[in-house]
Image: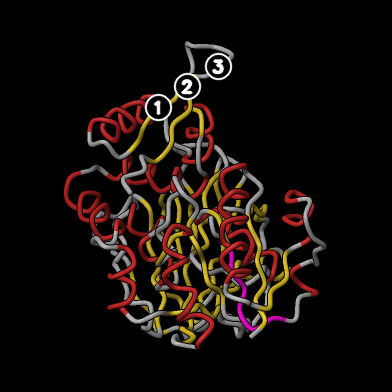
Amino acid sequence: MKIGVASGLEANMIDDARYVIDILNKNGADFMVEDKLAASLKAMDGLTIKRMNVDVLIIVGSDRYLLRKLLDLKQTEVPILPLASKGQPDYLFEISTANFDGAVGDLLDGNWKAEERRRLVAEISGKETPPLLNDIGIFAKRSATLIRYSLLIDGEDFWKDGSDGLIVATPTGSTAYSLSVGGPVVLSSAPVFSLIPVNSVNPARRPLVLSDDLNVEIRDLTSSAAIEAVLDGQLRRKVDNHPVRIRRSESSAMFVKFSEERVEELRGKLLKKTETAEIVAHELPPSAKLVLKVLEYQGQLSQKEIIEETMLPPRTVRYALSLLMSEGLVSKRLSLRDSRHGFYHVTNKA
């Protein structure tokens, strides 16, 4: 079995990647390292991921890094083993680098299966996006600005609406932005995707769960501000007067899946995702849920950056942050340059 290793380039991620490589060496694994990581380690040669001919690709880092790497890879059938770096949000990860020593034997012996994660693809201004693991969100670029649109499903008019935005999510993405705005939680194996209007002007408007063999078209998009599409929380694309067409991608992502018993043994606790999702689902208002998800995706942000990412009014963001900090879900670190300002991040409860 040939294994590839890629990692984010933050100091803690590089340290964790070095630890993973040491374990692979001790177990006699045949592996190669991404060129950017190899340059940071200064101890070996590397290849770009697209040139790697491997059976499994290990990605060390955060949810944000994993999503960005999948966008860069586009179409790939190589099973991916995500390893959460210490101190990083790990909602898309089953195990962390700290658990890898206990999992490497199962990995090398083939005691795992490849789990399919369906993805979406969108056509925006006549250009196709990379496959999306989580979601596509359509919003006005200026915060708290209404957009109006017509929704068509398989070419038939379904509704016309005005709202703060619209999210189309995969089952994997159902616990990301979608959950923050009242979308349903969907099992990863379900052949569906969900469509969630964000703060619709019509109180009767509800999220939809659609078979993923249907085509979604969003047209007649208008707003007093420019409209953009947010892809997996990582990329932004300007939306013009052309329809946005969304469908299931022909390319799924494949993840290394260990048995549930093995994962519980390795982690030794309930999944943090379940614990935090329960708090979010029952106690926090939608604005706080949205701020929390943005911090999970983007990592550490200033209050100004949170306002720009969420498009919420400043007062709403301040209130949301105070609630999240009181729940112990978000922490604040003062800026070294100016003690009057700070950066917010998801609290590590590992």
Residue most extreme to the left: 282
Nearest to the observer: residue 28 or residue 3 = 28
Mark 1 touches mark 3? (CB < 8 Å): no
Above/below status of 94 relative to 277: below
State which tag comes first along the sequence, 2 or 1.
1
Neighbour tally class for label 3: few under 14, some 14-19, many 20 plus, Cα within 10 Å:
few
Q: Do the residues labelled 2 and 3 touch (CB within 8 Å)?
A: no
Callout 1: 10 Å neighbours few (<14), some, many (20+)? some
The amino acid marked with disc number 3 is: Leu
Whether residue 131 is visible to the viewer of this picture, yes or no, is: yes
Compared across the picture, whether 217 is left or right of 160 comes to right
Callout 2: helix, strand or loop?
strand
Residue picked out by circle 3: 336
* Colour basis: secondary structure
Q: For the residue marked with disc 1, what is the amino acid?
A: Lys
- Residue that carries the numbered disc 2 in the rendered image: 342
In magenta segment, residue 307: no
Quarter holding the N terminus is bottom right
Vertical placement of residue 209 versus 109, above or below: above
Percent coordinates x, y for residue 176 in the rendering: 40, 58
Residue at point 43% right, 50% down?
Answer: 89
Residue with the mark numbered 1:
332
- For the record, the magenta segment spans 54-59
Within 10 angstroms of label 2, few (less than 14), some, or many (20 or more) residues?
some
In primary-sequence order, the first of circles 2 and 3 is 3
Q: In which quarter of the image is residue 103?
A: bottom left
Q: How far apart are marks 1 and 3 (CA)?
A: 12 Å
Q: Marks 2 and 1: CB-CB under 8 Å?
A: yes
